[in-house]
Every structure is written in C-alpha cells, then in structure tokens.
Image (cartoon, rainbow, N blue to C red):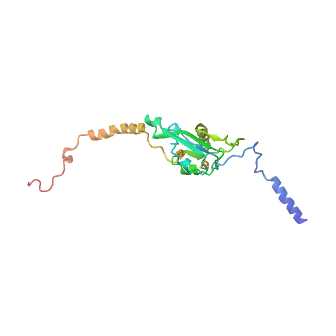
Amino acid sequence: MLNGLKGLGVTLRGALRSKVTAEYPKEHLPLEKRFMGFPALTWDAARDEPYCTGCMVCVRYCPTQCMSARMQDNPKFAEGDSHRKKIIESFEINLGRCILCGICVDVCNFDAIEMSHEHERSERLRNANRVDLPALLKMGRRYQDEVGWKQSKPNPASPNEREAAKTAAEPAISGTSGEPRDQEGSSPPEKPGEDAA
Ligand code: SF4
Ligand code: SF4
C-alpha cells in the first residue's frame, strides 16, 4: 500500500513538471549558441567580400570529399581595396554527404568557414542538397548575425590603407627632419689625438 502511494507520488510529480520536449516540426526549441549545424562560409563586412580565399585546405581534409572550391585573382586587391590577393570563385558542398565533423572549420586558417545553425535541409533526392557559393554565404551571414560572430584576428591593412597610413605619417616625419639641426651637436665627436695630428 505504502509503495503504491510512493509510486503514485512519483507519477504525479512527473505529470506536473514543466515539459522539456517540443512537438517538432510544429514547435522549435531555441538552439544553443554552440550548436553545430551544416558548414557555411563567412562574410567579411569590412572588405565586403568573403573571407574564403579558395585555398582548398578544407577540401583536402574533408573525410567525405563532399566539398569543391576554385580560387581566382581578387580584383579588389588589384584596386588596392583588399589585402587578399586570391578570393573564392566557386564553392560547393554536398550537404547530403556532410557528416558535420567540423574538420573543415578546424583546418581553415582564414576564419572563412563555420558550423552554422542550419540543420533543416532534408530533400527527397539523394543529390538535391548540393549548396553553391551564394547559398553558403547566405547561410554564413545568417549565422554571423545570430551569434554576433567575430573574426579571430583583425584584417591586415590593404594596399590603399598602407598608402594612406604612409601619407598620414609623412608630415610628422618631414616635420622632425625639416627642423634645423644643432650643428654643434650633430658633428661627430673628435677622436682623441686628432688635434695633435
Ligand atoms: S574555407 Fe578556408 S580552408 Fe576552405 S578554401 Fe576557403 S579559406 Fe581555404
Ligand atoms: S563538416 Fe566534415 S564532412 Fe562536412 S564539409 Fe566539413 S569536413 Fe566535410
């Protein structure tokens, strides 16, 4: 009898607890910031271009070989507006074959790829989940906005920025070099014994 009442108490406590599940797909639980969905490419808002240079390191390390990438010369570098000599031309990930291992993110040296929050991408056809560069960048930008993403280190200066910094520094340099120099102080000290010679 006592055990029966104890069991009933456990059942009642369980029934009154607030629920922790959701009726997916009608309801969606909020995702944790560190949730790992499909990989996506990040966008460098400061340079208005992708971070990805198309270096292919992630492509070579991907265990399922579901990625492909092609690089091109960066026209913005030629104009002096970017520090990236090369930039991505085309990129594709077959998300149907991606195992969400995160290796591509770990090996990228350019902050160019992240495991986004994207996870609802089921398709009926085996090959229907091939995602191209614009779609990967769209996923990446959405992820960056969601988590307030920040790059790990600041961009190096672009050729134009280096030039501007040099021009800004010039008046200060010429100001100091244009000062009349103290003739006495600027002459080299006489060596001992020179007078005698
Ligand atoms: S995502 Fe990173 S590792 Fe992959 S091609 Fe772009 S820059 Fe290279
Ligand atoms: S998460 Fe893993 S399987 Fe998916 S694209 Fe990156 S390296 Fe390949």
Image quadrant in which the C terminus is located: bottom left
Look at the image and tell me whether residue 148 can be seen. Answer: no
Image quadrant in which the N terminus is located: bottom right
Q: Give how far across and how far down residue 117 sits, in percent.
A: 64, 45
Q: What residue is rendered at 45% in x and 43% in y?
A: 156
Look at the image and tell me whether residue 22 can be seen. Answer: yes
Q: What residue is rendered at 23% in x and 42% in y?
A: 181
Q: In which image quadrant can residue 41 be found?
A: top right
- As drawn, the residue found furthest toward the right would be 1
Count of picture labels: 0
Q: Give how far across and how far down residue 44 sits, in percent.
A: 53, 40
Is residue 196 positioned above or below 80 on the image?
below
Is residue 12 positioned above or below 122 on the image?
below
Front-most of 114 and 170? 114
Front-most of 193 and 145? 145
Is residue 27 positioned above or below 8 on the image?
above
- As drawn, the residue found furthest toward the bottom would be 2
In the rendered view, does 123 fall on the left or right side of 104?
A: right
Q: Give how far across and how far down residue 82 sits, in percent.
A: 46, 38
Q: What residue is rendered at 84% in x and 57% in y?
A: 11
